[in-house]
Amino acid sequence: QVQLVESGGGLVQAGGSLRLSCAASGRTFSNYVMGWFRQAPGKEREFVAAITWSGGITRYADSVKGRFTISREFASKTVYLQMNSLKAEDTAVYYCAAAGYPTVTIPIKMYNYWGQGTQVTVSS
């Protein structure tokens, strides 16, 4: 049973930084892709960033390129999302997700494991 547990959300001022963590358990993830998504009130869930567990290949949404960095740590099976230069429009619930495909280009519907989400609020 795959479990994903996010942490690290909170309230931050515009221009500030936060680091989200996603602790993964339940299996080995060598052929998996791990993703971060977000959902703001009244909006659809959207892609933020993804990383292949083995090769470390990454992909970012245009809206976060240059500001956010996704990474993973093998020993602790943790995926991170470092968020810098935060803007009010980054406010959302952030979700960690996993899929059994070793590619960063799969659509959101193919992610079959999800965490419970963590709230990020950026005040302007």
Image: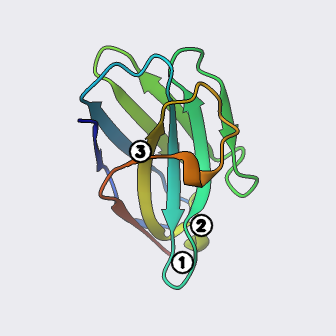
Q: Position of residue 9 (x, y in %)?
A: 34, 57
- Label 2 sits on a secondary structure element that is loop
x 60%, y 72%: residue: 89
Question: In the rendered image, is residue 84 in sight?
Answer: no
Which quarter shows the C terminus? bottom right
Q: Position of residue 52 (x, y in %)?
A: 57, 26
Q: Residues within 10 Å of mark 1 (few under 14, many from 20)?
A: few
Q: Earlier along the polypeptide chain: callout 3 or callout 1?
A: 3
Q: Is residue 71 left or right of residue 107?
A: left
Q: Amino acid at mark 1?
A: Ser
Q: Amino acid at mark 2?
A: Lys
Q: Which residue is mark 2?
A: 87
Question: In the rendered image, is residue 111 in sight?
Answer: yes
x 47%, y 69%: residue: 92
Q: Are the two marked residues, 3 and 1, in contact with CB atoms closer than 8 angstroms?
A: no
Q: Residues within 10 Å of mark 3 (few under 14, many from 20)?
A: some
Q: Position of residue 110 (x, y in %)?
A: 56, 47
Q: Which residue is mark 3?
A: 19
Q: Is residue 53 left or right of residue 19?
A: right
Q: Earlier along the polypeptide chain: callout 3 or callout 2?
A: 3
Q: Which mark is residue 124?
A: 1
Q: Are the two marked residues, 3 and 2, in contact with CB atoms closer than 8 angstroms?
A: no
